Every structure is written in structure tokens, then in C-alpha cells.
Amino acid sequence: MWYGEYSHSLDSKNRFILPAKFREKIRELKIKKFYVTRGLDGCLFVFDFEVWKKMEDKLKEMPFTKSQSRSFNRIYFSGAQEVVFDSQGRVTLPDYLKDFAGIEKEIMIIGVADRIEVWSKKRWEKFYAENKRKFEDVAEGLIE
């Protein structure tokens, strides 16, 4: 549902604007709210409500008696914030999420099928450079 790679920047109020294609999809699907939280690999994850609810249900099933489950859920859910994009497709990033993702001003907005990822531009470029060479090898091992 979310695809592509878009370069943007934060404004003076720590807001970013979604790419036009994403805003069109939100209007088309009548999506009202999203959740943004700490993601993996140093980015932020942005989920629409339906996908968020599925992830939440799945993560709540993990046994709280396991240390890894507790740790992951604490970090993941404590970082979560419900957001509504304004009429211009903007949303404000709280400082704690900006700090987590190493975001200063320049960002990359990445569509990854069921989620949107928000990256520091520098961090994305580093991740991409390190992983593009492995892309075909990983595909060979994962996709049959």
C-alpha cells in the first residue's frame, strides 16, 4: 500500500509533510489516524490504525514473563504516539522520536508495503549503501 522513497525536511516546528501519493492514498482510504513509534534499524515506523491494531494484538500475545518480550514491548509502546496528519499532510515529530532516529532536518520517507518509515537522510543513505550489495543475496535466501 505504501511504496517509494521520498526526500523531505522538517520545518521549524519539527513537522514533516507526507508525499503527495501518500496523502492521496489516505484520502482514498479515508484513514483518520496513524501511530508513529520507534522502529528497527534506527528509523521510525508509521502505521495506519488497522495495521497498528494487528501489530498491537500480536505483540500483546508475547509472554510478559520473558525478558525480551517485556523489553521490546516497553520500548516499542512507550515510544508510540497517535497522530493525525493535518489538512496539508503534516505531522509534528516529538523530540524523543527525532532523537531516537537521529533526525536533524533532512529526512527520507520510505514506503514499505504496510508501513511508512521515517529516516534521518544520513542514516538512510548509510543503511542503503551497506545493504544494496546484499540485496540479491538476501532475495535468493528468502524468496523461493
Image (cartoon, rainbow, N blue to C red):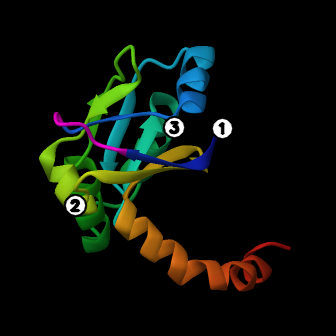
Q: Residues within 10 Å of mark 3 (few under 14, many from 20)?
A: some
Q: Which residues are magenta?
A: 9-13
Q: Which residue is mark 1?
A: 1
**Amino acid type of the residue that numbered disc 3 sits on in the rendered structure:** Val
- Say which mark, if any, is on residue 51: 3
Q: Mark 2 against mark 3, which lies toward the viewer?
A: 2
- Specify which label sits upstream in the sequence, 1 or 2: 1
In front of the other: 60 or 49: 49
Q: Looking at the rendering, in which quadrant would you find the N terminus?
A: top right
> From the viewer's perspective, is residue 64 above or below residue 28?
below
Q: Position of residue 112 (x, y in %)?
A: 58, 51
Q: Please report the residue visible at 75 percent of the width from the left and 76 percent of the height from the top.
A: 139
Q: Please report the residue visible at 42 percent of the width from the left and 42 percent of the height from the top.
A: 46
**Amino acid type of the residue that numbered disc 1 sits on in the rendered structure:** Met
In front of the other: 53 or 2: 2
> From the viewer's perspective, is residue 35 above or below residue 43?
above
Asked if the magenta segment contains residue 74, the reply would be: no
- Say which mark, if any, is on residue 100: 2
Q: Main secondary structure of the magenta part?
A: loop
Q: Position of residue 21 (x, y in %)?
A: 60, 30
> From the viewer's perspective, is residue 66 above or below residue 92?
below
Quadrant in the rendering for residue 137: bottom right
